[in-house]
Every structure is written in C-alpha cells, then in structure tokens.
Amino acid sequence: MGINSESDIAANLQIGPTTEGMVRIYVEGEGVSLPLDFDPEEAEEIAEELLGSAKKARKMLEGKGGKGKKG
C-alpha cells in the first residue's frame, strides 16, 4: 500500500507527551495498537513535514478548483 492508495481501514490517532519526555503518536485500529515514540526534535521535524504536506495538498486542491477546509 502506498501513500496514494485508498483504504477502508478506520483508526484512532492520539498524540501527546509521555512521562519519559518523549512525544507519542498512538494509532489504534481493528487488531492494531501501535505506539510510536519520538524525541522532541524528531516530533518537531514530523510536525514541519505535516504542515508542509498540508500546504502542498491545499495548493493541489486550489489548482483543481476545490476550496478545501479553512481553519
């Protein structure tokens, strides 16, 4: 499965700090419980990648005449 593959799988996502000073991204779905821990610097890099990807996706929507969400 690649980044552009659609899926019918539903999952819950939680993000927060751990008591050990890490940032945890916790993904839980049917038969899956996946805690992913990152040090604060890695978490900031991930956040920057998310923001950059959101900006690119928004531009792609605008180029197709879509409005996307504003928030």
Image (tube, grey):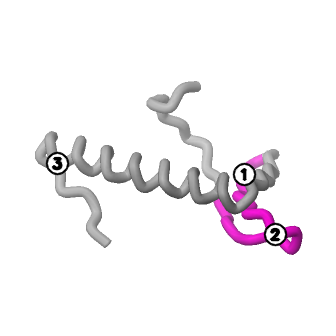
Q: Are marks 2 and 1 in contact (CB under 8 Å)?
A: no
- Position in image of residue 28 (x %, y %): 74, 55
Mark-to-mark CA distance, 1 and 3: 32 Å
Residue for badge 3:
62
Within 10 Å of disc 2 (Cα), the crowding (few <14, some 14-19, many 20+) is: few
Q: Please state the total of marks drawn on the protein image.
A: 3
Location of the C terminus by quadrant is bottom left
Q: Nearer the viewer, mark 2 or mark 1?
A: 2
- Position in image of residue 20 (x %, y %): 88, 68
Check residue 24 for magenta coloring.
Answer: yes
Mark-to-mark CA distance, 2 and 1: 25 Å
* Amino acid type, mark 3: Glu
- Position in image of residue 29 (x %, y %): 72, 51
Q: Is residue 7 left or right of residue 57?
A: right
| Image vertical order of residue 20 relative to residue 26, above or below | below
Task: Judge whether residue 32 can be spotted in this image.
Answer: yes
Q: Is residue 70 left or right of residue 30?
A: left
Q: Main SS type for the magenta part?
A: strand
Residue at 57% from the left image edge and 51% from the top image edge: 46
Residue for badge 1:
29
* Amino acid type, mark 2: Gly
